[in-house]
Image (spheres, grey):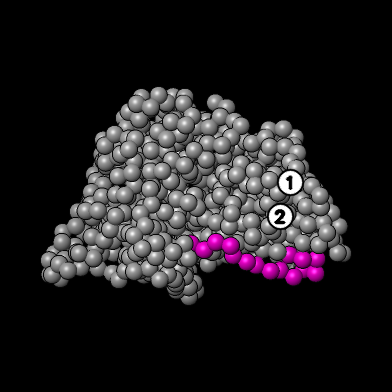
Amino acid sequence: MCGIAGTYLWPDGKTVTDRLTETLAHRGPDGAGRYGHPVGDGEVQLGHRRLSIIDLSETGAQPMAKDSLVLTYNGELYNAPELRAELEAAGVRFRGTSDTEVLLEAWRRWGTDCLPRLRGMFAFGVFDERTGELVLVRDQLGIKPLFLIRRGEGLAFASELKALAAATGGKLEVDHAALVASLLYYWVPDSRCAFREAEKLPPGSWLRIRPDGQVQRGRFWNLKDVAAEGQARARAGERPDLAAIVEESTRKHLLADVPVATFLSGGLDSSWLTALAARHQPGISAYTIGFRAEDARFEAMPDDLRYARQVAEQFGIELHEIEIAPNVLDLLPQMTYSLDEPIGDPAAINTFLICQAAREAGVKVMLSGMGADELFAGYRKHLANLIALRYQRVPGPVRRGVSGVVDRLPVATSRRGLRSVRFAKRFLSFADLPEETAFRRSYTMYDQDELLALIDPDLAGTVDDVLTEHADTYEDNALDDFVNRMCLADARMFLPGLNLTYTDRSSMAASTEVRVPYVDVEVVKAAFTVPGDRKIVGRQGKAVLKEAATSILPREIVYRPKGLFSAPLRAWMSRDLAPLVREVVNDGELVRSGFLRRDALNRMVAVDAAGQQDFSKHLWHVLTLEYWYRDATSRSDQSTRQTA
């Protein structure tokens, strides 16, 4: 795992690339490198920051130049041993044992045809000295990031957006449409970028730029096609052996020349991975989190620690327990900077603090259970949307009566939150809506009218665009299975846009690599071969995964109530962050700029304080958005003053 950057036909490319690479130092504290070569009337410059995981020697250093090909690469190839054996059989001679060299030689032999064969997480740039072409590539599922900017015939790229902002002197313009999208979702979708001039290379795609400045794009993997093929295989009677597939993926994800540990929340996904990892790597350690007792009580949070301890004891795992009682006033701006774009999920703090503790203990690699919920319908929203179909058959007068009663119930008392009431209010907010709209409302922050009331009226057309984009993505498939339509939408939007993004940024801020064995091409293929009625059975989400996990885990762990990898937001908002909320709502940059409307924010604060609705997550995201916006606009203002 590393940080990559570079420029192509870019003015002052050497200096800019050095600046890009320096900004990425936290992603690779073990080494740095840069390569330059003439191209047409300019040059290419490739930069690299190294986090040494496989082949710790200098033979794994980057950018790696060999026989006219040069590679700067961020990621891990879990099938590198198999590819290496195939290449050696074809006569390739290797200098070291790194997967970087395997990737370089695979590219030499097969070009873009090698890409569907890669099993791992990756973003890389490969330059051919003979043709002068640079190709940028991002992995199938968007696990690893790659941002780029085009100016004229030139291009600059980096693993993080903040690097591009720094290298361009803060001259990037905020994209208000992306900020509107972030308010809806509480993250910026992978199809958008918080700065207007920048873009994210889409998952499963490549971009080639030539010395004449011409750009060609291609796609080597498409989730929509994978889902359709999975449905066809299911109709043909194929039933994948999930237990074997997940175990194989976990085993491959343990490939490293440094210590590996796991996240262990005590939930199904992390417990299964940890148990499988312990089977293949006895003595592996795990990290788990807990919260201050008063915060957990106020939030009515389940006691996940006891389950994590049970798994650790049963499988002989050394468990490190971290109590999260952070100084959120200090952590909030730090996390906002690390996350690159406005992301309102406090789970990023959990990830950062766990990775920081692991890194201090000498652990560079962590395994996470991320992705299982999206692929196997494990979130409450999946079950809730199925229940909504049945609820719509209830007579209208009964539904109106239920809604009236629930609407009057408080979501919290002065001493604790009432989670069941929060869930009921959330359910009724979308239960009567059509499929795509209901699914969107089941996990986003606002309905259309609420969002319009919150922002600058001039951005009304942008709201329509953002909602249309969701509808287009959700409906872009040929699946006749409601549950798998939801899973496909999550794998295309929720997974790369939020969960993989905050996992990458917050872990790399602590110079730690997080691997996600469920977000593996073979696991994904298997997931879409499972019909929806085997993913949700009765009131059980992830039913088929739970069935597979019973081969190693006790039923008490497999069928326990679902936990939350989140944070006690209501407690933080009512105590630690209350003064900051008042400041941002009344005199924040977003309010003063006119982007957010003070009256709408004040109504939200009042309703939340009265305990009638839970707006803690909404207000947390407003804080993250405010801090991000302050930083982005202050950089731009500084640049303007410097050039004036």
The residue singled out by tag 1 in the image is 92
Could you tell me residue 571's position as x and y percent?
Answer: 35, 41
Disc 2 is placed on an element classified as helix
| Quadrant of res 149 | bottom right
Q: Is residue 642 left or right of residue 320?
A: right
**Residue at 38% across, 68% down:** 479
Could you tell me residue 602's position as x and y percent?
Answer: 38, 57
Q: Amino acid at mark 2?
A: Arg
The residue singled out by tag 2 in the image is 109
**Residue at 34% across, 41% down:** 549
Q: CA distance from mark 2 to mark 1?
A: 9 Å
Q: Amino acid at mark 1?
A: Val
> Does 10 sit above or below residue 545?
below
Could you tell me residue 231's position as x and y percent?
Answer: 38, 63
Q: Is residue 100 magenta?
A: no
Q: Nearer the viewer, residue 291 or 222?
A: 222
User: Of marks 2 and 1, which one's residue comes earlier in the chain?
Assistant: 1
Q: Nearer the viewer, residue 444 or 386?
A: 386
Callouts 2 and 1 close, C-beta under 8 Å: yes
Instruction: Pick the quarter of the image with the C terminus.
Output: bottom right
Q: Is residue 229 left or right of residue 210?
A: left
Q: Is residue 214 magenta?
A: yes
Total numbered circles = 2
Q: For mark 1, does the 10 Å Cα neighbourhood hold few (<14), some (14 to 19), or many (20 or more) residues?
A: some
Q: Nearer the viewer, residue 179 or 629?
A: 179
